[in-house]
Image: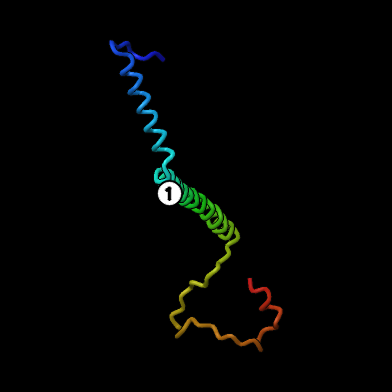
Amino acid sequence: MELPKCDDDKLVYSFIREATVNIVKMIKSKEFMSDFKEGQKRFGEDVATLVNSILLTFVYIIGVGSTSLIAKCFRKKFLDLKQDKNKKSYWEDLNSTKRPIEEYYRQF
């Protein structure tokens, strides 16, 4: 890349040299580097939050969605949602003497 022709080439070259020196001084300064490092850290945290949100959304949709579809195929009900107007309460008494203990090990 050629520099534009000018009557005073020394002026153009000195301007470029001074600008380059100032940029290098700015980059070498501790304040610039610490601010740059802090900016990179914030950017990394933001990207990690975004990626984790997207991945967890897919995992939730695949995990919960597939479980729901399989349960519907086998007509499995995880909650007893039938309403009985004759019942006063839907609480079930835990009476371990009525059932054998093996049934408590495998509840589903």
Above or below, 34 against 82 in this view is above
Q: Is residue 27 left or right of residue 10?
A: right
| Residue that mark 1 sits on | 38
Q: Which residue is more in the foreground, 9 or 106?
A: 9
Query: What type is the residue that disc 1 sits on?
Result: Glu
Residue 61 x, y percent position in the rendering = 51, 53
Residue beneath the point at 39% across and 13% down = 2
Q: Is residue 84 left or right of residue 98?
A: left
Residue 50 x, y percent position in the rendering = 45, 49
Occupied quadrant, residue 21 = top left
Q: Which residue is more in the foreground, 78 or 32?
A: 32
Q: Which residue is more in the foreground, 39 or 85?
A: 39
Q: Which residue is more in the foreground, 84 or 3?
A: 3
Q: Is residue 50 visible?
A: no
Q: Is residue 6 visible?
A: yes
Residue beneath the point at 45% across and 85% down = 88
At label 1, counting other C-alpha atoms closer than 10 Å, the crowd grade (few under 14, some 14-19, many 20 or more) is few
Total marks shown come to 1
SS assignment at label 1:
helix
Residue 24 x, y percent position in the rendering = 42, 33
Above or below, 107 against 101 in this view is above
